[in-house]
């Protein structure tokens, strides 16, 4: 069981009532503080304090004297049963746990994996207090305004069989988005989903186990559904969300579509590795043929022409001497830039 996060400055009782309270407001109508206090057996000041904390988590609450509180628009909260219904028979491949608030779905699921959680265990959350991105960065999301989830996959052929896993996951997420969007999602090596070179989704893969024996991967995914201005300002790169793209699909359906595509991709990946998915990945590659630079872990930068990926998922760079060189590793950063 994942440990829930603690929301500061509210009592434990108020904390426990916060998410049921937000679900009560999800219809977009006004609800008076007096009515909410009576319904949740809290004081009106506790209702106010709880909703103030929701505002600090990125969810705007409209408060109007004499009318009460409401969300500016209806919110579809995550519902494991609804996701399972959308999955159909594929729901058997997953054990879905919806968390109102957690420090990090990846951290929580990694602990569960070490305790023996089953293959296909899924943690999804409405809010992360310490979301993790690649290269030690923080993943920013809005309460009720994103898809933030982690999936546990177990493998019998060891860590050596996992090359290209983050690329395979990116392919699945792009496919799920492209079911609903007129603006095609494309891929940036090794683990970003882009629309018009702006980041829509990110992927973090954490692995443990033996090189040639039992191993597991915790795959964390964050997808921007609706960002507010504060969240956009907190990110040091161009971002986009589904609302801006005109995508109106509900979050439970979208999560199910991600899981359906992940199941299909993982089935091929388990059997044949990334090589079986390479051509599909290349078809969505946003950088092939572009002049790029790679920032390497030793602080060097190399420049050349992006030339796709090989069958292991390594990035292929054609340098000024027309030599094709592979690069791999999670600490490498890819940027558009003039070839030298």
Image (cartoon, helix red, strand yellow):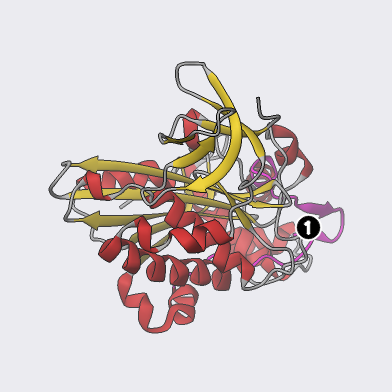
Does the image show residue 83? yes
Q: Nearer the viewer, residue 154 or 227?
A: 154
Number of residues whose C-alpha sits closer than 10 Å to that of mark 1, classed few (under 14), some (14–19) or many (20 or more): few
Q: Nearer the viewer, residue 303 or 182?
A: 303
* Residue 291 located left or right of residue 327: right
Q: Is residue 23 above or below residue 191?
A: below
Residue 1, x across and y down, in percent: 30, 53
Is residue 60 found inside the magenta-colored segment of the image? yes
Is residue 131 found inside the magenta-colored segment of the image? no
Q: Residue at x 35, y 45 (%)?
A: 108
Does the image show residue 41? no
Q: Residue at x 69, y 50 (%)?
A: 59
Q: Which residue is mark 1?
A: 244
Q: Is residue 27 above or below residue 13?
A: below
Residue 328, x across and y down, in percent: 41, 36
Residue 28, x across and y down, in percent: 76, 67
Residue lying at the far left in this picture: please name it.
213
Q: Residue at x 45, y 56 (%)?
A: 169
Which quarter of the picture shows residue 153? Answer: bottom left
* Residue 127 located left or right of residue 207: right
Which quarter of the picture shows residue 210? Answer: top left
Q: Residue at x 14, y 46 (%)?
A: 212
Residue lying at the far top in this picture: please name it.
299
The residue segment tinted magenta is: 54-80
């Amino acid at each position: 069981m994942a440990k829930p996060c603690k929301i500061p400055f509210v009592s434990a009782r108020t904390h426990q009532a916060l998410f049921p309270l937000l679900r009560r407001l999800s219809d977009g109508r006004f609800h008076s503080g007096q009515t909410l206090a009576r319904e949740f057996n809290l004081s009106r000041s506790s209702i106010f304090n709880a909703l103030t904390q929701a505002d600090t988590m990125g969810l705007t609450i409209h408060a109007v004297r004499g009318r009460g509180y409401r969300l500016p628009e209806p919110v579809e909260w995550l519902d494991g049963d609804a996701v399972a219904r959308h999955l159909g028979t594929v729901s058997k491949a997953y054990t879905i746990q919806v968390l109102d608030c957690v420090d990090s779905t990846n951290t929580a699921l990694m602990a569960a994996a070490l305790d023996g959680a089953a293959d296909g265990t899924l943690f999804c959350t409405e809010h992360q207090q310490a979301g993790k991105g690649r290269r030690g960065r923080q993943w920013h999301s809005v309460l009720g305004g994103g898809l933030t989830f982690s999936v546990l996959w177990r493998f019998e052929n060891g860590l050596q069989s996992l090359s290209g896993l983050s690329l395979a996951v990116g392919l699945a997420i792009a496919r799920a988005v492209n079911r609903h969007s007129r603006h095609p999602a494309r891929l940036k090596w090794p683990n970003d989903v882009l629309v018009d070179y702006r980041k829509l989704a990110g992927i973090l893969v954490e692995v443990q186990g033996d090189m040639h024996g039992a191993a597991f991967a915790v795959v964390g995914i964050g997808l921007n559904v609706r960002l507010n201005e504060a969240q956009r300002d907190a990110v040091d790169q161009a971002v986009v969300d589904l609302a801006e793209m005109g995508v109106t699909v509900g979050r439970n359906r979208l999560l199910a579509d991600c899981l359906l595509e992940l199941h299909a991709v993982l089935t091929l990946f388990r059997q044949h590795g990334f090589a079986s998915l390479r051509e599909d990945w290349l078809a969505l590659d946003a950088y092939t043929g572009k002049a790029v630079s790679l920032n390497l872990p030793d602080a060097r930068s190399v420049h050349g022409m992006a030339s796709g990926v090989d069958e292991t998922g390594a990035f292929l760079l054609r340098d000024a001497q027309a030599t094709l060189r592979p690069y791999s590793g999670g600490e490498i950063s890819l940027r558009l830039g003039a070839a030298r």
